[in-house]
Amino acid sequence: MSKRLHRFHDPAAETPGEINISPLVDIVFLLLIFFIVTTVFVEETGVDIEKPRAASQQDLERNSILIGITPEGGVYYGGREIGVGGVRAVVSRLIKQEAMPVIIQADRRTPTETTVNVLDEAKLGGAADVFVSTVGE
């Protein structure tokens, strides 16, 4: 007796299966949250500065206080003008939270007197390290 193989025709089996993408979406959102939390945010000075050149340039830590000085002598921190007199208050407030270096981004056409005054105010505000930002050659 020969046995015949019968194929059953199931119309529901012909529809393609669906792929559940909700676990994929969950993973993508978790990765997005991870990268947002671990990113170091650097505050810029808020003004365009043309830095002077220096052969002895070195890279510093990313966590620092950036103070910008325009050619006209305007002193900026975080996009707002603080003036030379406001440097001491800003620096002393920020280093109470965490000890950080102060980086002065002075335009190359800025008067030296203004740069020195900002440097002095940063030191009087309690900054242990004050640097002047330059562009390497």
Image (spheres, rainbow, N blue to C red):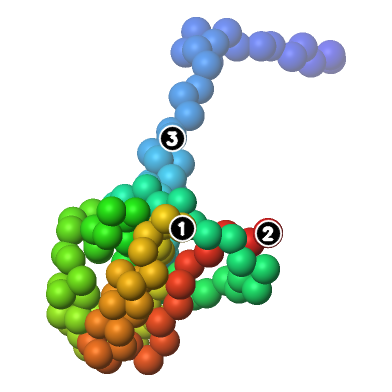
- Tell me the SS state at disc 3: loop
Q: Please tell me in which quadrant of the rendered image residue 71 appears.
A: bottom left
Q: Which residue is mark 1?
A: 108
Residue 117 placement (x, y as % from top left): 29, 77
Residue flagged by tag 2: what amino acid is it?
Glu
**Would you call the spot at circle 3 few (<14 residues within 10 Å), some (14-19), or many (20 or more)?**
few
From the image, state whether disc 2 or disc 3 is nearer to you. 2
Residue 37 visible in the shown view: no
Q: Is residue 128 above or below residue 17?
A: below
The circle drawn on residue 137 is 2
Residue at image position (39%, 70%) is: 112
Q: Which mark is residue 21?
A: 3
Q: Nearer the viewer, mark 2 or mark 1?
A: 1
- The residue lying at 25 percent from left, 90 percent from top is 124
Give me the disc on residue 57: none
Identity, as a three-letter code, of the amino acid under mark 1 = Arg
From the top left corner, tell me how far across and down residue 107 is, in percent: 41, 57
**Disc 3 marks which amino acid?**
Ile
In whole angstroms, how far apart are the C-alphas of marks 2 and 1? Answer: 14 Å
